[in-house]
Image: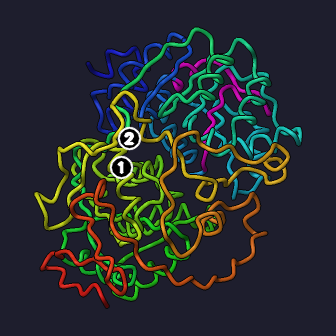
Amino acid sequence: MKFADLGLSDETLRAVTEAGYDTPTPIQQQAISPVLMMKDIIGIAQTGTGKTASFVLPMIDILAEGRSRARMPRSLILEPTRELAAQVAENFEKYGKYHKLSMALLIGGVSMGDQIKALEKGVDVLIATPGRLMDLFERGKIMLNGCSLLVIDEADRMLDMGFIPDIESICTKLPANRQTLLFSATMPPPIKKLADKFLTNPKYIEVARPATANVNITQRLIKTSARGKRETLIKLLKAEKVSTAIIFCNRKTTVRDLNKSLKQSGFKSGEIHGDIDQGTRIAELDAFKSGAINLLVASDVAARGLDIKGVSHVFNYDAPWHPDDYVHRIGRTGRAGASGVAYTFVTPADEEAIDNIQKLVGYKVDYLGEGDGGTSNAPVEGAAAADAVPEAEADAPEPAKRDTDDAPTARRRSRGGRRESSAPRPAPVERADPPAKADIADAPREDASARTAEPARAERKPKAAKPARVEDAAPHKQVDATSADGDWNGPVPGFLGIKLDA
């Protein structure tokens, strides 16, 4: 099947062809025609499956007829984060260049005055985060009774960020006879309840197996120590053919320190985390996309949804605290049929986190220098069955790691705080700072200028490593309980030449 078979206009097909595409992805094949027929849609798909174009392309043709009015957008797309909202805006610019459609982006970290001016001119497409949209609505700067098409994207992440009450409120302010498209990585009960309440006889579309990592990604674990991570990374960057890479850290302080160290070592690197204002975030991402820098050190604010072509490597400098984050992170490489490599640094304190990751994905990941350096086909004991494992994007990080860029603090508190994901959390992992304090600052408040610098916290001395559990530990993860510093005693690839007790 080709895009020309889906009923899109000649102008939209021309833009798609010029972007280098001629064959739709499975979600696009199944969604575009029903959307053009004005049907409500529930789309279950992971990030990287092409779901953004599955609603952007038909929306362009639907909105080609008609005229916008001041402060009354004709369509609304809700996104959980600034980065995802900006990415959808880029898609509209790319595929809608032969249509005369107006667009506005309502996100935090950008002048509200400029956004209000754009709304007053009238827009065909409004792309917004729930927090900023609700602020402007409460100020009387926007009316939603003229909106005939609503898209709720990344619904499961909206749930984990506490946006569902806002979304329900927004839905009640839109015309009852509108068309509604809901996209999510999974369908937990609260999202199903939302869909049942606000969608009319929706067409259900599901693509990709739940909780699967891209088969084009070679995954490897690397044994190291907390003090040896930086040296390990630098040697890997020099030994591997790294064209572009994203390096994920759990804390924004680690992001800043590592980026500074990489620059001092002669690498072209940049950083992105919640303390960076929106303009600087966009500038860093543009520099990474253009090749001005080829290493991007990031917190989990960048883990979901960003589609950057040509990322050859992903490095988990810190093993993710929650297993679903692993799939999101490594999914930044191996996109659009390309191959990629994902390395995860593993210290003794990460044993249970790695065990939970392998249970989620359903297979064991080899350590560098063991096996074929890729993944094992042997199932992991305790892994859920394929039809019972949650979708890769189902379990967003706990509150400490959510990107609540555009959630007004007062309103969140008045509604009883954010909701917790219903998915099981991994057992606690020994670490220097509790995540609740370490990364809550990774979510900037509405007014970035009002933030004050977070004082540095002294790291607590880690406890001695516990003996490895024989009954469920992977063969690679045996730890010598008598080791003074709890470092790994297993083999290390010779080319790294790393002393783990350094």
* Residue farthest to the bottom, as pictured: 502
Q: Position of residue 501 (x, y in %)?
A: 30, 88
Secondary structure category for the residue under label 2? loop
Residue 499 in view here: yes
* Residue sitting at x 74%, y 33%: 122
The percent position of residue 169, horizontal first and vertical second, equals 78, 30
In this view, the residue in front, 237 or 490, is 490
Q: Quadrant of residue 16?
A: top left
- In terms of depth relative to the viewer, which is nearer, 385 or 126? 385
Disc 1 designates what residue? 331
Q: Is residue 39 magenta?
A: no
Q: Point out the image quarter for the N terminus.
A: top left
110 on left or right of 422: right
- Three-letter code, disc 1: Gly
- Helix, strand, or loop for circle 1? loop
Find disc 2 in the rendering and name its residue. Answer: 48
Q: Main secondary structure of the magenta part?
A: loop
Asked if residue 63 lies in the magenta stretch, the reply is: yes
Mark 2, residues whose alpha carbon is within 10 Å: few (<14), some, or many (≥20)? some
Residue at image location 26% in from the left, 68% down from the top: 478
- The reply to whether the C-beta atoms of the residues labelled 1 and 2 are less than 8 Å apart is yes
Q: Nearer the viewer, residue 318 or 2?
A: 318
Q: Is residue 157 above or below residue 55?
A: below
Label 1: few (<14), some (14–19) or many (≥20) C-alpha neighbours in 10 Å = many
**Which percent across, then down, holds residue 66?**
65, 19
The magenta stretch is: 59-81
**What colour-coding does the image apply?**
rainbow
